[in-house]
Amino acid sequence: MIEKMSEPSDEQVAMQHYLVCGTADCQKNGQFYCNACQRPLCEQCKAEHQKSPQNKKHEIVLYRHRKHQLPVEKCEDHPTRNVDMFCKECKIPLCSKCSIMEEHIGHKFDDLEEIFTEKYALQQHEFSKIQKYFLPTTQGLKTDIEEDATQIRKIMESIRTSMKAEAESLKNLVDEVTTENLENTHTMEKSLLKMLKSQETTYDDYITYLGKMSDEFQQHLSLANQKLIFSETLKIKTIPDTTRPVLPVFIPGQFKKDEVTKILGKVNVPDIKPEKRKIRPMEAVTTHMKSTEKQLEQSTEKSDMKQTLSLSSSVTKVREYSVPGVDSALHVSVDKSDRLWVSDSRGNLVQTDLQGKQLQKIQSSGYRDEGYHTATQDGDLIYTDIGKKVIYRITPDKKIIKFIKTGDWRPLSVHSSRINGDILVGMDRGKEAKVTRYSKAGKELQNIQRDNQGQGLYGYPHYITENINGDICTSDYYKHAVVVVNKSGQHRFSYTGWWSDLRPLGICTDVLGHILVCDYNSGTVHLLDQDGRFLSVILSSQQGIKHPHGVCVDEENNLYVGQYGTNTVTVYKYLQ
């Protein structure tokens, strides 16, 4: 019978807020892991461990990068031995005693732990591809199909409307022509009757003339008056000529159904080859599928940097900025030129250079204490206007462009993805709240509103950011939690504080996947790993922080902190 020993899964570990160091009598956070000793280490114990000559070749990595321990299985033939070898010829696992048995003499063996580590990494990589590429890409294609269906319905409705309008137009034209033709018949009738009346009058006059002539001839024929007999002979005028009217004839219109179709038009499907839906190519998972070569290179550099960066034992203040034009620094964005964008509660949004000189000032409507602006990889700044329900884009040449209209949803918080340039927006409408993903061109891609049980994920998405693994991290003031969903919108975890009720404000992530969030209640900044485990209070009153409200990390891994009640932005170093 095979006996197995197992370690906690990553999911189980992710449910813990604090991983204890594996060194005896040490209760500090074990954020590192010695693959050789197979135990977690805190930063101090890690340093001590590496000093020992016998541990010189030990590989120490971040806990989430650890090699997973080979599950212990007892050999069926030799119950006191563990299965730890793999016979390459027989292709079976076995123990060290089995390897010297007659049937395995001359065979080659591999370390089973190395094979397990390799297979585990491979499966983890494949699983990662499903989560980061295949699933979101397929869901994107499904969304594409739904959008096509919506577009077809709109197009066909538009065509039907156009056809009805065309038919109505033709009906009006037929009515107009018919009316003109009827009026023309009346005109013709009047003209012909007038002509006949004139002819009738001509003959009436001639009949009168004939009456007079008859009277004269009777006088001539009278014997009582002989003189008239010898008078000039009377001549009768000829009968006036008249013409018969040419009668109008109605010639029916000559038309067929095809001719009417030509007039009205018809719907045709173009005889062209259907275009294949674009399936974005799968990029290396370690680059998190960056959309351009430049982003790929930057991701590679960051990946290299991750191998050398770690949390510093202390936080160091680097510099301070006094930002003119604001009374508080409730949210901070840093653009590609290391220029600051800082906002206060009065809707003032100010850009300054490294010397604190004001470069731009924008006025947004309403009381604003959300993370309502974000710098993009293209050098633009995107900000939301809660009153107008519009998202604006400010270009490097200071042009303000109306970018996205959000309908009856109020755009509260916004973040521009460093992975692919997508725009993430936290919104609310009455008692509803959601996160919407837009493309960098402003096309709506995704709506995230409910969990798998149909419950609302958000109450008030105050601040929003994205982690290096594509997780969407939202600071929700009403939920008293940092709500984290994966790229597909599935709820991963909610962080509600370590020792007291959390009132989260500003939030950001760093190159190592840490989540940094301001807590209004304690006046501190918490540091979490990307699975929601509490690591430490990184900033507090000990570092001169009283009311932290907005946080941001730049490309050089500097931490910018803005506070309520002061226009000073302080910069710290916390990675080494």
Image (tube, rainbow, N blue to C red):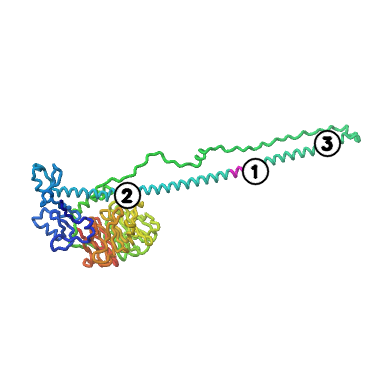
> Residue 139 — which label?
2
Please name the amino acid that badge 1 sits on. His
Q: Nearer the viewer, residue 556 or 485?
A: 485
How many numbered discs sit on the rendered protein? 3
Answer whether residue 182 is magenta in the image.
Answer: yes
Residue with the mark numbered 3: 214
SS at circle 1: helix
Residue 276 located left or right of residue 155: left
* Residue drawn 15% across the image and 43% down it: 91
Cα distance in 3D space between marks 3 and 2:
111 Å
Residue 31 located left or right of residue 187: left
Residue with the mark numbered 1: 186
Q: Nearer the viewer, residue 123 or 164?
A: 123
Residue at the far right: name it.
224
Mark 2, Cα crowd under 10 Å, few <14 / some 14-19 / many 20+, is: some
Q: Nearer the viewer, residue 562 or 322?
A: 562
Main SS, magenta residues: helix
